[in-house]
Image: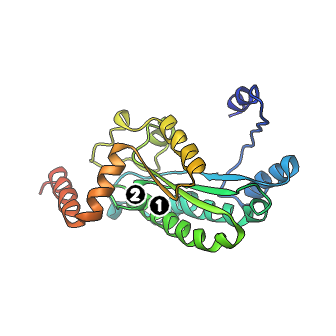
Amino acid sequence: MQAIAERLSRAPSQVIAVAADVTVAGDRERLLDEARRRWGSLDLLVNNAGVASFGHFDSSSEDILRRVMEVNFFAPAEMMRSALPMLMKGRQPTIVNVASLCGRRGLPGWSEHCASKFALVGLSEALRGEFARFDVNVLMVLPGLVKSEDLGRHLLRNEGRMPQLFEKAQPPEEIADAIIQAVERNRRETHVGRQARWLLRVNRWAPRFVDRLLARKVRKLYPE
C-alpha cells in the first residue's frame, strides 16, 4: 500500500496511505481525522472494502454471516455517516459504493455476499434521497466477478461446487475506470462487465427464467 502511495505521489498530487480496519470505529475515525488534518474537507468517498464466503447457506454459520455483513454493509454505512460532515464541505461531494451484481440478483453459493450487497444497494438508494438536501451524491458501481487474488485467497469459506472462474473475471483496472467514469458523469448506477450487464438485463425482464436456470445448474452439481 505504501509503495502504491509513493508511486502516485510522483504525480502532481498528494497521496497518503493509512492502514486501517474499516470494521473498527476507532480506525474509521482515524482515517477521517487524517484526511481532515491534511485537507479539511472531503470531495469523494469510495467504499470498496469487501469480503466473501463461497458455499451453501445450510452448511455455513452465523459467525461467517456476521463477518461478511460487518465488512460489506456496516463498515460502509458507518463510514458514510461519519464522513458526511466533511463531505458537506467538499466540492461536488460524492460517495461511491462498490456493490456487486449480487446486490441486484441473488446467486447460489454466495448467499452471505448477496445479503450484504443487497443491503448496501438499498441503503445507497435511500441515502441518495436523504443526502440530496446536503448536495452529496450517492452512486453505485455493480461489477460482476472481479479478478482479485486477495478475494479468492481470503474467502472466509470455499466449499461450493459452482465454478468460480476467477481467471475469466474482470480485471480490477476495469472496475477502477468504471468508478472514475461514474463520478465524472454522475451516473447513479453503473453495471460493469458483460457478465453483470447480461444477467441483470435478463433478470429484469425474465426473473423466473433466471431462477430456473440457476436451479437447474445447482441440481446438476448436487445430484441425488
Instruction: State the count of labels.
Output: 2
119 sits to left or right of 38: left
Q: Quadrant of the N terminus?
A: top right
Q: Quadrant of residue 127?
A: bottom right
The label number, if any, that marks residue 164 in the structure image: none
Q: Around disc 1, counting alpha carbons within 10 Å, would you say few (fewer than 14), some (14 to 19), or many (20 or more)?
A: many
Q: Are marks 2 and 1 in contact (CB under 8 Å)?
A: yes
In front of the other: 40 or 30: 40
Residue 128: x percent and y percent?
A: 58, 68
Q: Is residue 49 visible?
A: no
Question: Which residue lies under the disc numbered 1?
Answer: 117
Residue type, label 2? Cys
Task: Look at the numbered disc 2 and give the secondary structure of its residue.
Answer: helix
In front of the other: 206 or 118: 206
Residue type, label 1? Lys
Return the disc, 2 or 1, that comes first in the chain's sequence: 2
Is residue 15 shown above or below 105? above
Residue 106: x percent and y percent?
A: 34, 61
Task: Look at the numbered disc 1 and give the secondary structure of its residue.
Answer: helix
43 sits to left or right of 214: right
Residue 206: x percent and y percent?
A: 22, 64
In front of the other: 186 or 52: 186
Q: Residue at x 49, y 64 (%)?
A: 121
Coloured how? rainbow
Q: Residue at x 43, y 65 (%)?
A: 115
Q: Residue at x 75, y 43 (%)?
A: 18
Question: Which residue lies under the disc numbered 2?
Answer: 102
